[in-house]
Amino acid sequence: MTDDSPLPGDPSLAARVARIVRVDHAGEYGAARIYAGQLAILGHGDKAALLQHMAAQEQHHLATFGQEIARRRVRPTVMLPLWHVAGFVLGAATARLGEKAAMACTVAVEEAIDEHYQAQITELGDDEPLLRDTIEEFRQEELEHRDIGLEHGAEQAPGYKLLSTAIKLGCKLAIKISERV
């Protein structure tokens, strides 16, 4: 028996994959809603093209995990109605604080997602290589979003550290809830 062998009571690979697909679908849904909120406020400003680019990638991620939900017959999180409102409000509220605050929101979310996706990639290991590779591809795009946010003044947002910390904590809480509920 190796160190990574499952122990009695450990979830099966199928259960772990269902949890991954459920939470990633929820996360991409929330991200799409954040960009919708930001675009509602900043959709005609000089950051509109950047926001639309990132929103389009999030829509692709969401569609991909939506297909995985259907293909694998995974129950989506029951929290989607809350994430629908919370994501939009977070996006719109940070955009109302200004372009730099919107970028700070992007950086905070993407840093939390990077950590989350990296843990999933490690957890999957050689199991489910197509899913693992999809998550890695999306992780790279999320890192691109983080870098865009940093290049466009995220760290100059008023209260950046506090805002970033609060958003990351919210993301981590949403992840934990969506994995299970």
Image: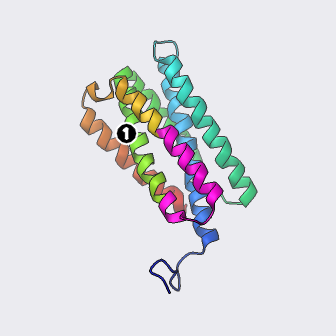
Vertical arrangement, residue 77 with respect to residue 148, above or below:
below
Callout 1, which amino acid? Ala
Q: Which x, y percent locates residue 126?
A: 57, 65
| Residue that mark 1 sits on | 108
Vertical arrangement, residue 108 with respect to residue 6, above or below:
above
Who's the residue at 53% across and 18% down the image?
A: 49
Tell me where the magenta segment starts and ends, as one range.
121-142
Q: Which x, y percent locates residue 161?
A: 25, 37
Q: Is residue 129 magenta?
A: yes
* Magenta span main SS: helix
Query: How busy is the neighbourhood of tag 1: few (under 14 within 10 Å), some, or many (20 plus)?
Result: many
**Helix, strand or loop for disc 1:** helix
Vertical arrangement, residue 45 with respect to residue 141, above or below:
above
Who's the residue at 58% across and 42% down the image?
A: 29
Q: Is residue 106 left or right of residue 9?
A: left
Tell me which corner region of the image, top left, top right, bottom left or bottom right, holds residue 18: bottom right
Residue 135 shows up from this direction: yes
Who's the residue at 48% across and 52% down the image?
A: 117
Q: Which x, y percent locates residue 34?
A: 50, 34
Residue 78 shows up from this direction: no
